[in-house]
Image: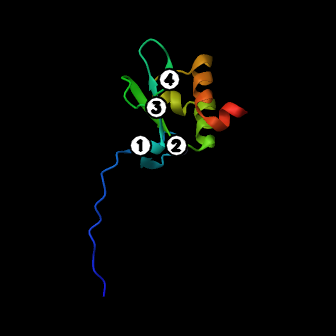
Amino acid sequence: MARKQPKRRKHVPQRTCVVCRTTTDKRTLTRLVRTPDDGIHVDPTGKRPGRGAYLCDNPACWDKALHSDVLANALRTTLTDADRERIRAAHPRLAQG
Ligand SMILES: [Zn+2]
């Protein structure tokens, strides 16, 4: 006999990857933040002030973020070379190549 067990799940904040639009829990996404005077930074704590955008861990999304306007548009800015370097360095798979 089937007994329904109420699942007690903690609420996990959901965020959307700006490239592939996958919505998943915040911890599997990387937050990028546009700082007022220091370009775009990766924000592992998720607490830096500034306009933020999230990327999932799919390298293809990071690649597209770096080589298209998707991320720049999401952050309402343009990516500088220094921004791209920082972002690339933050993803283990991209940092290798
Ligand atoms: Zn994605």
Amino acid under disc 1: Lys
Q: Residues within 10 Å of mark 2 (few under 14, many from 20)?
A: many
Task: Decide which of tag 2 and tag 4 comes sooner along the chain.
Answer: 4
In the rendered image, which residue does mark 1 sit on?
26
The answer to whether residue 91 is above or below residue 21 is: above
Q: Earlier in the sequence, mark 1 or mark 4?
A: 1
Residue 82 horizontal/vertical position (percent): 60, 17
Tell me the element at label 3: loop
Disc 4/disc 3 C-alpha distance (Å)? 9 Å
- Amino acid, disc 3: Pro
**Which numbered dot is residue 41?**
4
Amino acid type at circle 2 is: Cys
Kindly identify the residue that appears in the image at 60 percent across and 24 percent down.
84
Q: Which mark is residue 44?
A: 3
**What colour scheme does the image use?**
rainbow
Q: Is residue 27 visible?
A: yes
Q: In this view of the protein, which residue sits in the foreground, 21 or 90?
A: 90
Quarter containing the N terminus:
bottom left
Quadrant hosting ligand 1: top right
Q: Position of residue 17 (x, y in %)?
A: 48, 42
Secondary structure of the residue carrying tag 4 is strand
Residue 56 got which mark? 2
Query: Reading the chain from its start, which is encountered first: label 3 or label 2?
Result: 3
Q: Look at the numbered disc 1 and give the secondary structure of its residue.
A: helix
Residue at 43% over, 18% down: 35
